[in-house]
Structure formats: structure tokens, C-alpha cells
């Protein structure tokens, strides 16, 4: 089981299990929240959560129409 752990203060800590329903990021183009499937994301290239971004569906469509790729 993978999980996120965040210390709120000296007396409180929150632990949340990572699963297929609770991983999100912010679209780098418009700022909308995007739900992320980590399994699908890791199939094409190594999983780099610090250097990787996921665009929302609308921004992805716009980029595909323009023939762009977000770097």
C-alpha cells in the first residue's frame, strides 16, 4: 500500500492511502483539476511525479488540434 503522510502540527498527522480514485493534479494550461490514473500514466514512460504534467481533456484536444506537445 502506498500512502501520503502530512504532519499538520506536532500533535496531528494525516495518512491517506493512494488508490485509483484519489490521485489528482492541476492542468498546467488552464489550472483545472484532473484525475490521474497512475497505472496508465506509467505505461508509456518512467513515472516522474515531479517532472510530469497531465492536461485536462479540453486542453489536450486543443493541443492535438494544433499539433503541439506540452513539455
Image (spheres, rainbow, N blue to C red):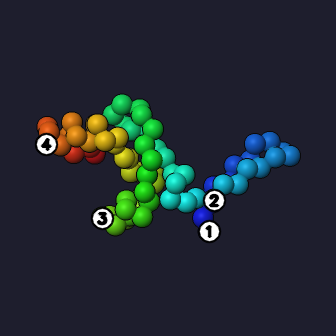
Q: Quadrant of residue 57?
A: top left
Q: CA distance from mark 4 to mark 1?
A: 39 Å
Ranked by sequence position, the earlier of labels 1 and 2 is 1
Mark linked to residue 17: 2
Q: CA distance from mark 1 to mark 2?
A: 7 Å
Give neighbour class at mark 1: few <14, some 14-19, many 20+ (Cα, 10 Å). Answer: few
Residue 68 visible at all: no
Tell me what residue is drawn at x 77 percent, y 49 percent: 13
Q: Position of residue 27 (x, y in %)?
A: 39, 38
Element marked by disc 1: loop
Ranked by sequence position, the earlier of labels 4 and 1 is 1
Ranked by sequence position, the earlier of labels 4 and 2 is 2
Q: Quadrant of the C terminus?
A: top left
Q: CA distance from mark 1 to mark 3?
A: 23 Å
Element marked by disc 2: strand
Mark 4 and mark 3 in contact? Answer it, CB < 8 Å.
Answer: no
Q: Is residue 16 left or right of residue 66?
A: right
Tell me what residue is drawn at x 33 percent, y 34 percent: 29
Mark linked to residue 1: 1
Which marked residue is nearer to the observer: mark 1 or mark 3? 1
Ranked by sequence position, the earlier of labels 4 and 3 is 3
Mark 1 and mark 2 in contact? Answer it, CB < 8 Å.
Answer: yes
Element marked by disc 4: loop
Q: CA distance from mark 4 to mark 2?
A: 37 Å
Residue under label 4: 67
Residue under label 3: 44
Amino acid at each position: 500500500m502506498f500512502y501520503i503522510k502530512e504532519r499538520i502540527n506536532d500533535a496531528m498527522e494525516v495518512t491517506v492511502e493512494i488508490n485509483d480514485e484519489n490521485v489528482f493534479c492541476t492542468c498546467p494550461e488552464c489550472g483545472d483539476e484532473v484525475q490521474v490514473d497512475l497505472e496508465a500514466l506509467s505505461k508509456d514512460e518512467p513515472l516522474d511525479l515531479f517532472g510530469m504534467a497531465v492536461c485536462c481533456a479540453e486542453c489536450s484536444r486543443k493541443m492535438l488540434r494544433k499539433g503541439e506537445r506540452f513539455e
